[in-house]
Image (cartoon, grey):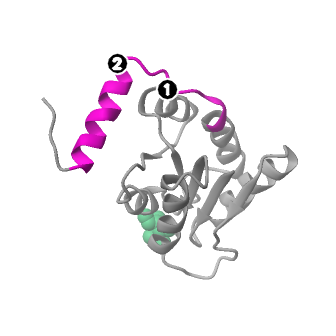
Amino acid sequence: MIALGADHGGVQIKDAVKQYLEENGISYQDFGTYSTESVDYAPIAAQVALAVADGIAEKGILCCGTGIGISIAANKINGIRAAVVTDAFCAEATRKHNDSNILCMGGRVISEEQAVEFAKIFLNTEFEGGRHQRRIDQIAAIERGELEK
Ligand code: RB5
């Protein structure tokens, strides 16, 4: 299951991604928002991030105006690696190298078509492991209050 969330600045690209998931039989849960009425992004980011961190969702996709605020909020949850993506290269690289589990995008930055393109890449690219796993482990050590050398 893919957890989706957005504020008013990202609702349109979130809905475009939702339509792609629906058309392709990919299960999802939409945590809102559902209109362009102004809402705060942090509580929505937290709901999606907790669903991913708890293993309820395999991955998450969060959208706000820039993708930045909602990514900062999501990254406060332990185990979350939320990446703001503005091009196809980064959508692929962040899965291969960072094992990112939440894709963040900005509705005031990219088009609906780009959002669907980046989501497709993000959901279909595997983590490469190897030396990148060591770096992910170091990030987890930071979360535990340890700093590995
Ligand atoms: C809302 O106006 C806007 O600040 C928000 O969508 C996002 O861009 C924050 O980073």
x and y, in percent, of residue 81 in the image: 42, 46
- The residue that appears at 58% across and 47% down in the rendered structure is 59
Q: Which residues are magenta?
A: 123-144
Asked whether, in this view, residue 120 is left or right of residue 108, the answer is: right
- First in sequence, mark 2 or 1: give its number: 1
Kindly identify the amino acid type of the residue bearing the numbered disc 2.
Arg
Instruction: Assign the magenta stretch its main secondary structure.
Output: helix
Is the CB–ligand 1 distance for label 2 below 8 Å?
no
Secondary structure type for disc 1 = helix
Q: Secondary structure at mark 2?
A: helix
Circle 1 residues within 10 Å: few <14, some 14–19, many ≥20: some
Question: What number is the disc on residue 131?
Answer: 2
- Please name the residue shown 64% across and 71% down the image: 32
Q: Is residue 80 left or right of residue 17?
A: left
Q: Position of residue 37 (x, y in %)?
A: 62, 82
Locate residue 123, reporting x and y percent.
64, 37
Q: Which residue is mark 1?
A: 96
Q: Is residue 42 left or right of residue 143?
A: right
Residue 86's tag is none
Asked if residue 127 is positioned above or below residue 142 in the image, the reply reads above
Above or below, 65 against 120 in this view is below
